[in-house]
Every structure is written in C-alpha cells, then in structure tokens.
Image (cartoon, helix red, strand yellow):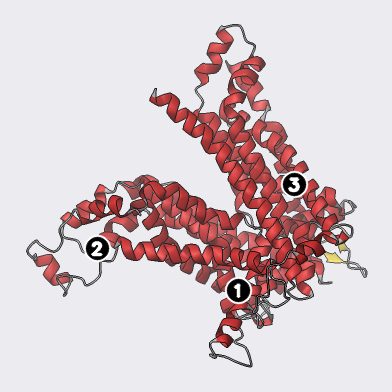
Amino acid sequence: MTEHLAVPAVKTPTVERRPPTMPELVSSPKPQPARRFDEPRFLRIFTGLVLVYLFLPILVVTWYSFNSKRSLQVFGSFSLSWYGKLFSDDLIKGSLLASVEIALVTMVVATVLGTVLAFGLVRAQSRANRPTDVLMLLNLITPEIVTGIAFLLVFSQLGITLSLGTVIVGHITFSIAYVTIIVRGRLASINREVEEAAMDLGATNVQAVRLVTLPLLWPAIIASGMLVFVMSFDDFVTSFFTTGTGVEPLPLRIYSMIHFGVTPEINAVGTLMMLITITIVLAALAVYSRQQRARLAFLAE
Amino acid sequence: MVGTRRLWSLLLLPGGLWLILLFVAPFGMVIAVSLGTTDILGRPIFGFFPENYQQVFDPIFIPVIVRSLAFAATTTVLCLLIGYPVAYMIARYAGRFKTLLIVLIILPWFADYLVRIYAWIVILGNEGVVNGVLRAFGLSGNPPVIFLNTPFAVVGGLVYDYLPFMILPIYAALERMDPSLIEAGKDLYGTPFQTFRHVTLPATIQGVIAGSVLVGLPAVGDFATALILGGPNTYMIGNLIQDQFTNGGFWPFGAALTIVLMAGLSLLMIFYLRSASRPAEATA
C-alpha cells in the first residue's frame, strides 16, 4: 500500500551504476550486495510478523473464549456459554466491581493531583522543578515490585489493614507522574498571552485559567485520566502487595483462577478486560488527537 | 510577578507531598526493615543487623541474581534486535500509516498485563494451541513439546511485555534524525551496512539507550512473568523477594533484597542520565 511513497525515497542513490571506488573495493568484496540491508520489503514483512506476534495472544484468548468446548485444541462451535457462566459467578462480579471502583477513584484523585502539579511546574518555573522532575522520573522507572513492597511494609508497620483503600493509595502514587507529564506537555504549548489577554479584558487570575486555559487543556486532562483508569484497572503487581483478605481486584482474581488451571472462563474474563481497556485507550487517543487536528486546522486558516 | 510565581509554586505542594510521603518515605521504611530482624511471630523489629545484606550475596542466591540479570540482558538485546527494524520501517517507509502503526504497536500493551502473560499458557501449554497444531500435523504426539517452565518461555514473555518500550524511543530518535544524513552516507560510497553503522546508529543511540533502560530495568525486577510462565529453574530475584513477603519468608531479608535491587537499578539509571545529558555530541 505504501509502495508509491516508499520507492522513490529508497532508490535515490544509484548504488549499482557507479564505478567501484578504492575504499569500496577494499572494504566490501561483493560489489553488489545480493539483498539490500535496509530494503523496505524485508522490513515491511518483518514489521508485519512483529504485529502478528503482538496481537496473537490477544486474538487467541478472544477466539477460545467463544469456544463451546473446554479444549484449547479443538474448536467446537461458537458459544457465549463461558460469558454466561462468568456473570453468574459472584466472585468475578465482585472483583469486577471492585476493580472499577478502584480505577474510578484512582482516576479522579490522580488526575486532579497530577494536573495541579503540572500547573505548578509550568507556571512557577521554580527551583523545585528539577527535584520534582527527578522524583517523577524515579517514580516511573522504579520497578513496581519495589514500590509494592514499600507500601506493604509501611501499611503493616502503621497498623493499617490492607483493603481496597490501600490498593487505591498505591495506584494513585504510580499514576500521578503520567498525568503530570501529559498535561504539562499540553500546558507548555498553550501561549501564556491568551490568558494575559483575558486578564486585560477584566478576568481575574482564576477566571482566566478556568475560562481560557482549562478548555484548551481538557483533552489532555481527559486523555490522561482515561490512561490512569486503564493502568489502575490492569494493575497486578501493586495490587498483589496491597490487597487485603476481602474482595480481590480482577487481575488478582484471574491470577487465583490460573492456579486451578486454564479454563475457558479465564479466556472470557480476559477478553472482557481487554475489551474494556482497549476501548478506553482508543477513546483517549481519539479525544487527544481530535483537538490536535482542530489546532492544525486553525493554524492552516 | 514574583508574587504570582510564588502562588503558582504552591501548586507543587499537593502532588509533591503525596510523592514524598508515599513514594520516598516508604523507601526509608524498607531500609529500616532491611536492617532489622523479626520476633517469633515474624513481625519486624528494628535494629542493626547488616547480615541481612550478607545473606543477599550468599552463594545460594548468586544464581538467582545472575539469572535475573541474564534474563533481563537477553530480553533487552532481543527487544533491540526486533524493535530497531520495526522502528526504522515505521519512521522511514510507513508514510501516512505511521500513526496507525504506532497505535497498533502500543495497543496490545494496554490489553491487561496478566491476561497477556496468561495468553502464552494458552498458546504454549502442554494442552495448548501450538501443541495442538503440532499434533494435528503428526509432528509430535505424546508426550507434548514442553515450552512452559523453561527459560525460553520466561524470556519470550518478557520480550512480549516490554517490546513497545524499545520501539517507541528508537522511533522517536529516528524521526528526529535528518534523513539526508543517510543519503550523505551513501553518497560517500558507504554500503548500507556501513551507513547504518557509522551514520544511522550513532545518530539514534540516545533512543537505543533510552529503550534499553525502559526494557532492562523493569525486566530485572519482573516477577509475574516468571511466576506464571516459569518454574523452579527460572526463579528470578523478583520471585525471591515476593516469596519473602507472601510465602512466609523472612521480611528483613526480602527488604534487603529490595534495597540491593533498587541500588543496582539506580546505578544503571545514573549511567543513563549521564549519557542522556549530553545529546549534543550525538547529533553533532
């Protein structure tokens, strides 16, 4: 499909037709390499195969969740029975609700904290910026097992019983930096003069932010909030160390189910989870890129 | 103006304090526990017992540490070998499909982490899809080919987990690079490989390093992949840590392991930050 675009870009240097030069004769015994190292066709096939590799597990799980048989090797007929079984399983329903609850609270709190932090970083440009950056980078790069254990130790030493609340605290902590980075990027690109113009027209500082800057910022805030929802909803490691004995979040429920072997029911839960997360991510991308396009159109005029 | 700036910097407080209290301070607790011991019930008692750290480097645990590093290094190299050509293809030849391809690369990563690992049991298990296909072609009847619980399964799973983190920074570096540099390399009679080695790779080395950090660091500490796809001979440092806390192990030892892991990763991180802080050399 991209052939028309790609071909001229590649063929420009006519390697084959020029006379061989000294350095070439010395360094490469074959004057005409049989297959070009960066040939787009090879690269295209390779990329295709990598995409198959990336999507294969998802497609396999989805496919077998509709299998009427228990087997992973024989496909009986199309059936929704495993989904039916899922919705009559109280443990799974409880876990699903718990996961949604955790993700919603995490989303709201982390988005507010992260956005406020982004405003502070962009607008104050204070000496605290560099340490805050380092803090966020460390937060992003620290393996979850390390932070998970740190939470477990702190909660147990302070005598806080592990519950959905402790899971939420853990999730908020790893989510703030993502929100700040996304919102800060957009905020830095908004011209400060727009706000100043609003203030010249009599708006107060707060009004200028609320009426001018926030509307421009909403797509970034909403997109980062959706991202946080998905990361919280998916999280296994932090939840693993901060969940109490009560209701487990859904990924932990799946983990317990895997212990009893692979069942089509897990395929059905997994498919459902992937459907939820992928839909939200696509929606977030749509929200974020729509404004980008609107801005481009505005600039073009 | 100075006054408003001070007001703005107040906004750093809520998020900053949250991170300090719930991200930085807990490290202090891990350090305190790592130097302590426990009472008869297994509850931590604070004290000064550096032998917890000696235990980390006990000959019994050296293979676990070496294995974790080897798995992470293999994962990083494989991600690089797979990821670089993909990033190169998207950056140079994908034209108007660039965004679509990037979305397709990231999207599977957002499908649930645990489900993605579990999916490999469905595919590679003894009663799984691959063995079903092999049996159908009469290539392997009974017993089935054993894929799971091997280092291959764990490293394969890790590569699958982290591949997008290698592709994205390399793609970004290739996008930043001036493509005429490649043409210049060819005009100077460089073979495609020479051009790649002396022009493209040096110009995108920042992306390669960033990708290696984003893949390698989490891979060292990963425990869910080895927990689900691995067995006793793929036991990683993350599994050792987890067992200290959840399977009736010794908490101070687990805390010491966590601190050693974190210290090792921080060293790598400092190396990365120092190399990232001089990007001018790479583009010059």
| Residue B113 place in picture, x, y as percent | 65, 60
Which residue is nearer to you in this view: A282 or A35?
A282
* Spatial CA span between label 1 and label 3: 29 Å
Say which chain tag 2 marks. B
Furthest residue toward left: A19
Q: Indicate which disc residue A70 carries.
A: none
The residue sitting at 17% across, 71% down in the picture is A28
Q: Which mark is residue A103?
A: 3
Which residue is more in the foreground, A95 or A217? A95
Q: Chain of mark 1?
A: B
On the image, the x and y values in percent for residue B231 come to 68, 80
Q: Left or right: B260 with respect to A247?
A: left
Give the alpha-carbon distance from disc 1 to disc 2, as whole Å.
Answer: 35 Å
Indicate which disc, 1 or 2, sits on the residue closer to the N terminus: 1
The amino acid pointed to by label 3 is: Ala
Q: Say whether mark 2 and mark 1 are on the same chain.
A: yes
In the rendered image, the quadrant that contains the C terminus of chain A is top left
